[in-house]
Amino acid sequence: MNPEVAILWAGAIATLGVYTILYRENPISRLFEHIFVGLSAGYLLFTTWTQNLEGKWWGPMVHQRQWYWAFAPVVGLLFYFIYSRRLVWLARLVMGLFFGVAAGTTFRQFFPLYSPQIYKSFKPLLPQAGLVWADVILHHWIFIVILLTVMSYFFFSIPHEGRFGRGLGRSSLLGRWFLMIAFGAMFGNTVMARISLFIGRVQFLLKDWIGHYLSWFAQRAGG
Amino acid sequence: MQQIPRHYIYLLLAGVVVWQLLAPMPLPISPSTATRGLYEAIRAVPEGKLIIISTDWDASTQAETWPQTEAVIHACFQARKRFVIMNMQPPMGVKLANDIALEVGKQYRARYGVDWANWGYKYGYGNVLMAMAKDIAKTIGDDFYGRPVTRLPLMQGVRSIRDIGLVVEVTGLAGVTEYWIGLIQGPYQVPFAAAYTAVMAPGYYPYLDSGQMKGMLVGAKGAAEMEALVRSPGKATTIMNVQSWAHLLIIALIVVGNLGYLLARGRREERRQ
Amino acid sequence: MGALEHANWFMTALFCTMSGVIVASVLLAQRGRAMFIRRIPGLAAIEEAVGRATEMGRPMLFSTGLWGIDIVTLQALAILSYIVRLAARQATRLIVATASSSLLPVAEESVREAYTSAGRPEAHRPEDVRFVSEEQFSYALGTIGIMARERTATNFLFGAFFAEALMLTENGRVLGALQVAGCPDPTQIPFFIATCDYVVIGDEYYAASAYLTREPTLTGSLVGQDLAKALLIGLILAGIGLATSYAGPAAPHNFLLNWLAQGR
Amino acid sequence: MREALQSLFLLRQAPNPTALAICLGLALAASVLLLYALHRLLGPRGRRWLIALVTFVGGLFFGLEWFYPARGHPSKNFLTDWIEPVSNMLTVVGAFTVGLGIYSLSQVHGRNVRLRRPGWHNSLAFFIAMVAMFVFGLWEHYLHLREPLPKLVPWPKGIYEILFSGLFAPLQAATFSLLAFYIASAAYRAFRIRTAEAGLMMAAAFVVMLGQVPVGAWLTSAIPAASGWSFFRLEKLGEWVLAWLNTPAQRAITFGVAIGALAMSLRVWLSLERGTFFSEQS
């Protein structure tokens, strides 16, 4: 069978169906929400098998005859004991293992994630090697002032009283302002990416779907 | 003005996007210095030297890298500079770029092998570049169509990296630029320019500032600016025109909201007095 | 500079010092040393938010974000269990929406535990701790569906959020819910600020459980965190000093930078 | 007998299918026995202790592998070779929880259908979509089709394509693209100069937004590119705001979050987080 036209129509109807939520949550959007959640659940089930268990568990256990993989489902199924009053502690046992792994992962990721950010903050405060004063002040000084004041905003255990405390209070207020500038910049920086998602969908509707039948649209919206 | 119902905002946005796609009203484009730098670098290539366009991209970033490559090829043909396409990763890039060059070449009656060529996909990053610097024909061997590059007319007199006048890297992959700058631009002082996806471009501004990079295209915006310079509006111009209108709409909404707020506050203060 | 595959002595020493400071101040606090915590508005609002749902007689929603069992989501569950206790006392219904099937049992377990410790184990309804979807946008649509159909009066969003954040909170706002959100990653905070009533920013997220419960272990940890941050600031200042003093054509030789950049 | 036992534990691979079946049976029996014994022998304190131990070992393994000095090339220590198999094992173990997620969904939607609650047909659509995706996904997988595909594909593959490319992918893309509308209306509402903070946020957003589109560059194109004032050209100013005002603030947040996560990890690892994660009754 050739599913192309069915794919086109299904895609267009699904897209328009989701867009009805812009008016408000309504029976049509609700239907597509349920279909979407259902498809994701089915997709999760089948990819859990095809992309995970089949290759990582069933294959080694059955085809390579590594018998110790028999322990994996036993450990995994311990999670299901949360529904038993008496055996719930076994579920906690395996959860504990995963908690430990989550903690260990944080430990081992700490430097790979953050040490580049630390040493890239080592900005010289005086002009050198090709930098002039304007560069240093516009870039490095501002960078370091923002870094330190924003960090000072996140000190929780020092009261903003006394000489040091008041200084910290002022610095953290400044830090909060810099935070707001940064948030504004992040907001503005995201707008284009989001609009292009919508342009992509409109192009699908006008060019691929309507344009499939009316070539005027295909030429116009092609881009 | 302070409380425009959200449905109107949604309709306005959808309306602007559909309108600008179907019946565009082009807003002016004024190319940034980074884009202009790349354009000038292409025009400044001395007679007899080749331009290398390294197209290290594939379908995943083609919304930006396709129009970028297209605009760069336009610029080369218009300036009557001969160029070669090559790539190091992923292999698909060289095929897509070949299609673009064939298509664009028709407008300029360009002939393969004389005005441009395709060196094909050469795996090996640093090793390829280091070997190429010494002996191009030997390193490249066969072209995209499997013929020895030595037979191509445009390769006559092209021996080493000294015969290359400019390298243009078009990519969505971080890390390729470092090879070009470290192994070719730095040691042999071959001019270098690049086109990046908008996401990765900010990381490469330092090279532009230091002059190691002659110019840079930033995402679809850079491509649109280049299309304006070569007077051949295409995909990127369409998209960026819609983007410009949508951004102006959002800015107008913010301004209107604030005007409404200021007026309302003024009225409240009057009443208080 | 290759990938950091293993630590060098400097990283190990730095890590042990920071961890040591944190653990030491936890132990000090457990011995009964009083610790101060400044006011954090977003967290102070949680009680008000629960109260609002109680007054309106409508349920609340708690979204744990996208990740599975991870430190970020474990912190979200710590906040959740505080909210459950408040909800249990005021007999207000709370619906939890998770996006990970491995997190589901953990969330279920901590909610049940919180109801039990609040003395109302019978109030816990297992079907109110839900798995929605592991796919980002069907999770978003499904959770918006819960907000709309259950007419939640208050939405809490704590955990790891990405593009779906704005989708959830914008719809929640339109549906008239009071919203409190927090996420350690800064990229979604601007959208929370635009659409939520109270926002917990960055590090405040990890200060939450200490602030809410005033448990000595947690307040002690918070003080330790501040000390570790001071240590980090010291390190950065030292690095800046070195970078500044090694000016000139002689290539910058900053030993701190090398220690941080080159692992083993 | 002794040899057989030895080979069972030394051999990570059973020699033939029969031996495999026996090994699997024994492994299952042994693990059930072990769990039963643990359940009978351990009191509440012992259980709590065991959970804390398992947590500690899990964290220690992944942490120590990174911090323990490594020698040789490629640099490894005594734990390095175990990281990959153990991570694999944990992924497999975690994958078995998928049933809990599906159970939770089926419980909610099954009740809607059974009790014919309002909107029950939506829940029915949920079940149909889930089952169809699962069945045709697996079916398509076991057809083992090779690229390039012919224009006419086997019908199960066709159905799968309609489900995936016709519904799943467009639903994803359409939902994602709703954000264009939400970001516009959020910008309209949030950026009011009520306070200095909101004003700063608005100004930064303005500059960055205009800097990203060609029309922004056009607005300030009167400023000569070579002059000292070129800093104020919108495309440059926007880039400066992102690189030099936004980056340090984000980085400062990241540092705080890093320390916060470290503290949380330490509390979880050492089971210090009392009263949060079911440590009260075991």
Image (cartoon, rainbow, N blue to C red):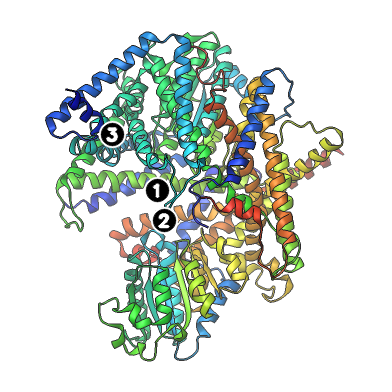
Q: Quadrant of residue D9?
A: top left
Q: Residues within 10 Å of mark 3 (few under 14, many from 20)?
A: many
Which label sits in the foreground, 2 or 3? Answer: 3
Q: What residue sits right under mark 1 in the picture?
A: D173
Q: Quadrant of residue D238?
A: bottom right
Identified by mark 2, the residue type is: Gly
Instruction: Say which chain tag 2 marks.
Output: A
Identified by mark 3, the residue type is: Met
Question: Between residues D171 and D134, which one lies in front from this camera angle?
Answer: D134
Report, in whole angstroms, how far the alpha carbon at label 1 lies from the one at label 2: 9 Å
For marks 1 and 3, the one nearer the N-term is: 3
Above/below status of A93 relative to B63: above
Instruction: Say which chain tag 1 marks.
Output: D
Q: Residues within 10 Å of mark 2 (few under 14, many from 20)?
A: some
* Co-location on one chain, circles 1 and 2: no
Instruction: Say which chain tag 3 marks.
Output: D
Q: What residue sits right under mark 3 in the picture?
A: D130
Contact? badges 1 and 2 (CB < 8 Å): yes
Residue C55 visible to an observer of this rendering: yes
Identified by mark 1, the residue type is: Ala
Question: Between residues C245 and C158, which one lies in front from this camera angle?
Answer: C245
Indicate which disc residue A200 carries: 2
